[in-house]
Amino acid sequence: MHATQPADKLLDQALNCHETGDYAAAKAAYTSLLAAYPDDINGLTNFGLLHLQHEHPDLAIPLLERSL
């Protein structure tokens, strides 16, 4: 799925929170993004990576598999 402007804004918000270490806000932003755009590859990948960084491979693996 090609990202639309709203998807880009949600992804930017999620990435900003992720990069600044605000795990809760990043999780909420990725969740909102994927609720609206469930096949967004960047959202799936980065949310999976966030889960891996916080030692939740059980949550990361399904997201990363969907991104392939």
Image: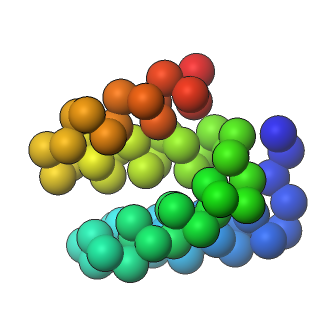
Determine the residue positioned at 49% across, 23% down: 65
Residue farthest along the left direction in this orientation: 55
Determine the residue positioned at 43% across, 50% down: 47
- Label tally: 0
Rendering coords of residue 46 (x, y %):
45, 48
Q: Nearer the viewer, residue 34 or 10?
A: 34
Residue 25 shown left or right of residue 32 in the figure: left
Colouring scheme, one of rainbow, by chain, secondary structure, one colour: rainbow
Rendering coords of residue 17 (x, y %):
39, 75
Question: Which quadrant holds residue 5?
Answer: bottom right
Quadrant of the snapshot with the N terminus: top right
Question: Which quadrant holds residue 48?
Answer: top left
Q: Which of 31 and 42 is in front in this view?
A: 31
Residue 34 shown left or right of residue 23 in the figure: right
On screen, 55 above or below 23?
above
On screen, 1 above or below 16?
above
Determine the residue positioned at 69% across, 74% down: 9
Rendering coords of residue 18 (x, y %):
36, 67
Quadrant of the snapshot with the C terminus: top right
Residue 35 shown left or right of residue 54 in the figure: right
Determine the residue positioned at 73% across, 61% down: 36
On screen, 29 above or below 44?
below
Rendering coords of residue 11 (x, y %):
61, 64
